Every structure is written in C-alpha cells, then in structure tokens.
Amino acid sequence: MFKKSILASVVTAFCLTSGAASAGPEAEVLHWWTSGGEAKSVAVLMEEFAANGGAWTDMPVAGGGGDAAMTALRARVLSGNAPTAVQLKGPAIQEWYEEGVLANINSVGVAQNWDELLPAAIADHMKCEGEYCAAPVNVHRVDWIWANAEVLANAGIEMPTSWAEFNAAAEKLQGMGITPLAHGGQAWQDATVFEAVALGIGGADFFRKAFIDLDEATLTSDTMVAVFDQMRIMRGFVDENFSGRDWNLATAMVINGEAGFQIMGDWAKGEFVAADKVPGKDFLCTSTPGGGFLYNVDSFAMFDVKGDNKVAGQNLLAELIMGQNFQKVFNLNKGSIPARLDVALDEFDYCARQSSYDMDVASGNGSLLPSYAHGMALRGAQAGAITDTVTAHFNSDMSSQDAVAALAKAVANSM
Ligand code: BGC
C-alpha cells in the first residue's frame, strides 16, 4: 500500500512536471539591461512572463549601448544555437532577417492590431518585408541634458539653451572644482554626445544628410568642422578618469553632485529614478540645444528556433511587450515613453511628457530623426565607421579639419 502510493505519487508528479514543461511557454532572452534602472525595467517583463506561465532564462550581457550583447548574439547564431528572443533594434532587425534567422510574429501583431497602436515610423522598424518580426517596448530620446539641481542652483546656473550657454555654465562649474560633464570614455558614449551636438549645431536637414544619406559634402562641411570643434571643447569638460567608465557610473556622478551635467539618452533617468531622485527637484532634464528629436526604440526580435514551447514563449513575449499596462510600468522605470500611442502619461514625470510633446512637434516639422549612435539610422558597418572617427578625434589632438576628412574616408570605405 505504502509502496503503491509512493509510486503513484511519483508517477503523478512526473506527469505533472513533464506535462507542464511540454505545454508551457519558454524563452531565453538576450538583453543588455544590467544597470540599476535597466534591471528594474526588465524585471517587469520577467514578472509578467512568469505570471502567464512562462519560464524565462535570462541571458544578460553587460555593456551599455549593446555592443557586447551583439557580439554574443553573433556567436550564438553562428554556432546554430540562437536565443529565442533578443533585444535588437533599428536596421539590425532587417540585417538579421536577411540572414534568414528571424521568426515571424505577424500573427500576434495582427491579432493585437499593432498597425493602429503604433506610430507608422515605429511600426516600419518592426517589420521585415511588411510583416512584424519585432516588438517595440519604448521610445527613448537620445538628445537630453541631465543635471544635478542643487549643483546648478549653488552655481547660479540655469539649464543651458544654447551650446554657448552650455560652455559658459561648464566653465563656471569647472572653476568651482566640479566636473562639468559626467562622461564615460566608451565609443558609443562619445557617439551619443556627438550626434546631439551635430543635431544642435547643424539642425535636422544637416543631420539627415550626414547620418542617413551619408552625403560626402555634408560630412566634410564647415558645419561638421564646427561640430568637431564643439566636441574638442567638450573633451575639456570631462574628468581625467573618464576612460572606459560605464554610462551609469557617469550618471551616478551627477546624482551625487560630483558632476553638473550628463548628455545621455533618457535611460539615464532610469538611474535617477532607481536612486529615488525626483525630477524637477533633485535633477533636471532639458533637450540638448538646437531642436529636433533623436529617437531610439528598443525592441525584441524573435529568432527562428525549434520547439512548440519556445514558439509559444515568443508569441507570449510579443503579446506582453505590447500590452498597455506593461508599456506603462516598464517605461516608468526605464525613463522612456511608451511606443503605444494609447497609454496615458498621467503617471509620467515632466521629462517624459516633454519627450512625448516634442516627439509630436518634431514629427510634424520633419525633425524627428533616428539616432545613428544607437543603431536606428544606419547599418552596423556605416555607423561603426562614423563612431570610430568620433572616438579617435575625442581621444587625441586630431584637428577638426582632419576629423572631417577621416570621417568621409571611413564612411566611403564602409560602403
Ligand atoms: C538602449 C537602452 C539602454 C542603453 C544603455 C541603449 O542603446 O536603447 O535601452 O538602456 O543603450 O545600455
């Protein structure tokens, strides 16, 4: 009797586990959200996935901007063992599609009516030959200045509205022994500052010609020389330990008052918020001088993998990612705004509301532009060529004239 019931319960338990395993959605998710604010944000997706019966295998690859994550992805795909879902964005989605390794999630997109819920420009980024192959979680804005409110008040400085004002404010802070610009010397961070400066100095048409059309005359123009001149000035505003510093550690310098400003996308706001700092009181945000809006949409693409559980996991993830509540809670943590147009912003702060308003205005006047530094505007080779030059200039005494010549050459070689 005793023996029998043990056997019976073992058999029952086995059936339950194996039954659950074969029916349950599964996903191995590759992403690069490892900072404090990022980890809190991705946890929202993990929790919703688990609450819906999903088994999540986490594959975080640290490294801001995702360069290390993309290297890890390449290795996995080459070895024939792609993760089920991958944080992937911009033209890289279509590049992977052309390799024939992406899964199609169009049925979820159609069932949830994504065409109606998303701005057309964002929906386009998510499609491969007209069908959904990726799901967007947010809209990050790249061209922001973040500041420590108390540091600025003590210095009698307002948030700058021109690059001349920024330079004057930075010099004042420097004179007081405060690092004006919190920065991490990693190529993608140099590129982030560079594209904000380029948009500010050159304007939307210049940005488009330079970083979307890759027009040689624009790349070597006097305006581009002026952009590199401003980058040289910026180099003088960073502390001597900036090399290799992670972006979130640079944000921490602003949070703790060691530095005045950081120029960074609004994932930086996720760090302030995770540190319980209040926008408008502890920290300030304003768009970088010059106008326009550089967007950076995070999304997940699904890779072609075998197994019903994995396919179920991909569909569940896609469905959850576009869920109204997920888009709210995730973005409150992440610092970005929802990709979905129908999420109310009542619970969002003034930075997020400014982002949403400015995005609308920019979309109406032709200055809503994809971030080149965050992989939204160009294919990898071309973006990499620009960034290599930007970082070579930032870390040497290269003249602006030499920098524009090097830029045009690097871009030509990358085609
Ligand atoms: C991503 C953000 C991320 C940031 C820093 C950006 O390229 O879009 O989601 O927080 O890099 O890692």
Image (cartoon, grey):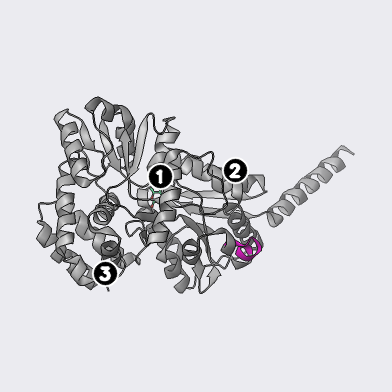
Q: Is residue 110 magenta?
A: yes
Label 3 vs 2, first from the N-terminus:
2
Which label is found at residue 47? 2
> How far from the left and from the top, in percent, is residue 135?
53, 59
User: Does the beta carbon of the residue at mark 1 sit less than 8 Å from ligand 1?
Assistant: yes
Q: Is residue 373 magenta?
A: no
Alpha carbons under labels 3 and 1: distance apart: 27 Å
User: Does the beta carbon of the residue at mark 2 sit less than 8 Å from ligand 1?
Assistant: no
Residue type marked 2: Glu
Is residue 13 at all visible to an observer of this figure?
yes
Residue tagged by mark 1? 267
What residue is shown at x 53% (from left), y 58% (from top)?
Answer: 85
The magenta segment = 108-114
Q: How many marks?
A: 3
Residue type marked 3: Leu
What residue is shown at x 41% (from left), y 34% (from top)?
Answer: 279
> How far from the left and from the top, in percent, is residue 79?
45, 65
Residue tagged by mark 3? 214
- Lateral position of residue 333 relative to residue 323, left or right: left
> How far from the left and from the top, in percent, is residue 207?
28, 62
